[in-house]
Image (tube, rainbow, N blue to C red):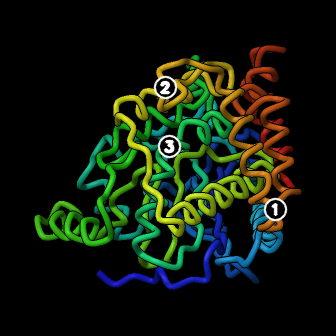
Amino acid sequence: MEHRFTGPAYTIGIEEELMILDADTLELVNAIETLLEPAPSGEIKPELMESVLEVATEPCQDMAQAGEQLRALRRQVAQTAATKNLAIGAAGTHPFAMWEDQRIVARPRYRDLISALRFVARQELIFGVHVHVGIDDPEKAIHVANGMRVHVPVLLGLSANSPFWRGDQTGLASTRTPIFRAFPRVGIPPTYKNWKDYERRIEFMVGARVIDDYTYLWHDVRPHPNFGTVEVRVMDSQTHVEHTLGLAALVQALVRELAEHFDAGKRLSRYPFEMLDENKWLAARHGLEGELVDLPHSDRVSTRALARRLIDRMRDHCRDLGSLGELDAVEDLLGRGNGAARQVVVYEANHDLREVMTELVAATAV
């Protein structure tokens, strides 16, 4: 398998999935084709459904450049939308939209996906943020992807931003998580022994004609050979762009720590898959308000305490990477609550989901 794990290391790329909304009703609108246009830096792209828009930065040298591009992309799509009586919003789910009302994008990949997965793909009306970090060696990429598995629950707890679904308060901080779980080849990824093991296992699946290529593995963390990155995919889309950038800075720092761990010749700790998966469920259910199991021990500790420990440990890495300023936004999530908690506060005032959407649209703007 060809790969581009050649460096430079720690470049950063960010992809955000955003809602296309009617400016008056704040309902989703099947209007992606009217918003596709070139961007000075980065890309504006379609996703599975016509009411979903994806913006993606270029591979950036640092968080400052990534932030500049992501803000510019959000501004551009919001301004274009406004000329068409549309608006842009960001969260892990739309609070009252129905998947039955959404059209599938007229692209072969997405039509084939519907053909293969049927209802499972049709009901995937969710919005996430994906972070790519450049890696300069294929063996290192496997090491980093394996090591990131233990951090997935904390990243989900911090980013949980989808407490409503189909007009209902679900009781979950990240409703997006169980919705996406219906897909095959998702969730906590398997571990790979090394690059050859990864190649062999992907090639086996391609040879069996169950996937066309590795991009049909939608795990929470995955090596991305074509880009030369490790991609972290577990996080809900963030309403505030600062939170997206803060989480990306945290991911970049975690990748750097694991890359240095590999360079030092160290071995990763081994954790039971069942416990990693259980911790992810606990994060989806409770966000920052619950507890996780503190691996490798069996003690349950508050998710906030684990997140605090992780943030403090990453501070030196962020300083070296020039992203300490972005990390302040993660402190804001920890101190003032994640997106799910903030949506619930708005909802509890009047039990009005359109009021929640009004707040989301206003906060999405940059």
Rendered location of residue 357, percent (x, y):
75, 35
Instruction: Name the residue tied to disc 3.
Output: 125
| Residue for point 83% across, 70% down | 64
Looking at the rendered structure, the kind of residue marked 2 is His
- Frontmost of labels 1 and 2 is 2
**Measured Cα–Cα span from mark 3 to mark 1:** 32 Å
Looking at the rendered structure, the kind of residue marked 1 is Ser
Q: Which mark is residue 297?
A: 2
Nearer-the-camera pick, 2 or 94: 2
Rendered location of residue 122, percent (x, y):
38, 45
Rendered location of residue 270, percent (x, y):
38, 42
Q: Earlier in the sequence, mark 2 or mark 3?
A: 3
- Frontmost of labels 3 and 1 is 1
Rendered location of residue 225, percent (x, y):
41, 75
| Residue for point 67% across, 42% down | 91
| Residue for point 39% across, 37% down | 271
Q: Earlier in the sequence, mark 3 or mark 1?
A: 3
- Frontmost of labels 2 and 3 is 2
Looking at the rendered structure, the kind of residue marked 3 is Leu
Instruction: Name the residue tied to disc 1.
Output: 323
Q: Mark 3 and 1 residues: CB-CB less than 8 Å, in contact? A: no
From the viewer's perspective, tell me whether residue 298 is left or right of residue 24: left
Element at label 3: loop
Residue 107 showing in the rendered view: yes
Residue 80 showing in the rendered view: no
